[in-house]
Amino acid sequence: MSENPGIPRRRLLGVGGALGLTAAAGLSTAAALSRRPAFTGAELRSALALPPAYRAPLPLPSVLKPVSTVGGVDRHQLTQRETKVEILPGVRTPMWTYGGTFPGPTIEARRGRPITITHRNELPVPTVVHLHGGRNTPSSDGYPTDLVLPDDWPDPAGGTSATHRMPDIPGMNAMDSTADPSMTGVAGMRDPRAVVTRLTRDYMFPTEQRPTMLWYHDHRMDFTAPAIWRGLAGLHFVRDDAEETLGLPAGPRELPLMIADRAFDGSGNLQYPALDPTLRDRPGVRESFLAGVLGDVILVNGAPWPLHEADAARYRLRILNASNARHYELEAVTDDGRRLDLVQIGADQGLLAAPVTHRTLPIAPAERYDLIVDFAQVSVGGLVRLRNRLGSGRTRDVMAFRVVRKAADDSRIPPVLARDLPSLRRSDAVRVREFAFRAGRMHGRHGWLIGGRPFDPARTDVTVRLGDIEVWRLIADVHHPVHLHLVGFQVLSRGGRQPLAHDAGLKDTISLRPGESAEIITRFDGYRGRYLFHCHNAEHEDMGMMANLEIS
């Protein structure tokens, strides 16, 4: 990582999925990936009969009620625990959950009103909670080594510091001989700044940010991907009075849609290619899945290919891609093959300045889109399928809406949605930095690197001053959804050209396509301290594709 380094030609590793395109030596990244494959990763196939699409009703996650509102602070409690959840009809699937459900309960917060969530860890492994998109102090940001230990977990060596353990992949070279032999794993790096608690932790969120839909998920060092896959994810809304006066669809016509893919074994248990199925000691996945893990069952709010009965009216769809690695390109198609408009009114970090209309909409892992779809154009009894143009077979289907009744609709889509978006100009930037997101070698093994280096929690990669505006140029070999903690950003360009239509607004995650570069601009405001930026392909993240950001 540097301010303006050259971009080296690099032979990428043939680890499955799109990376197979780069197995031949001597090809540049851009040339090798010019076909821009639709996905990066490898797909698991379920071993039991899957239900037909559009039979299960769309579940709506329950809203978590505060246990106290004293002193102007909403206080919540959540227990992380194992339970069995009916995802496939008639089958009970063991999952790790927030509060016993998948997704976890939805958090509703008001702008400017602080909330505290006390998480209690009754799972068999340490956990970390990250509020993705939240503008929070470092102590509540969910840094990967700020572990909450189960009651019976041994103390980490050194007391309060946490240990980072590298994956041990059979058939690869031996680990670096300089590794600390006192570590219980094959290698380790201490994080002297980690804050470890036992059984519980209070996460305090000031809620000083634009209204939007965030999500919370596990962020444990080296084990984020399998923890999310097992169920540790939920939605978190920030609302304010100004947004509620716009007249957008609300109440039962505002639908949160958490889209995720999974795969099941013959008993209905979740499949995942972890090297250590207990997720206690040995991080990593089998080699054929190093590029990312895809499932063959598409879930929305925890139900396979569900159906929602809708009025012939406008609906507000709050969509999150909570998949580990799967990308989607969404379209809403009627029985007669018409595509309904997807009117985008918001992005990751809240409302756009003005609506943007799409016929199809790509969405990468961790991205969120706020859409209006008008079912008044559909006859009563008609079916509207939400489909994935990047899928094949069953993964082309996502969910469906059945229009069941005519209804009055006083909602609207105002031509001006928000006037509070930051005005950031390239000329305001004090610095331009460049970061390459590429496959590479990590301690003698396959890994995923930023600027040629794997993540080390004890190393500061980038230092910025509070309040500075910077331009970051991001370069990818394969698909990399890049996420910045704490701050939102605006997209300046892609491949030296104008941003795409879906890049509008304030984002915290940008989807880089194979061989693509993009420029983003942001102001580093909010709080001083240690934060992260990383790829949100969760398998890439677990295998080194994170970096430390110090705001001073």
Image (cartoon, helix red, strand yellow):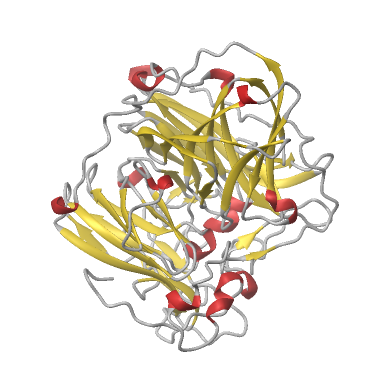
Residue at image point 22% right, 71% down:
4
Residue 460 visible to an observer of this rendering? no
Residue 190 to residue 465: above or below: below
| Closest to the observer, 99 or 121 | 99
Q: Is residue 58 left or right of residue 316?
A: right
Residue 299: image location, x then y, percent: 67, 44
Residue at image point 67% right, 14% down:
406
Number of residue marks: 0
Q: Is residue 542 left or right of residue 57?
A: left
Q: Quadrant of residue 545?
A: bottom left
Residue 44 visible to an observer of this rendering? yes
Q: Is residue 352 left or right of residue 83?
A: left
Q: Quadrant of the N terminus?
A: bottom left
Residue 233 to residue 166: above or below: above
Residue at image point 48% right, 74% down:
447
Residue 36: image location, x then y, percent: 52, 67
Residue 407: image location, x then y, percent: 63, 12
Residue 371: image location, x then y, percent: 50, 34
Q: Quadrant of residue 463?
A: bottom left
| Closest to the observer, 416 or 77 | 416
Residue at image point 33% right, 41% down:
136
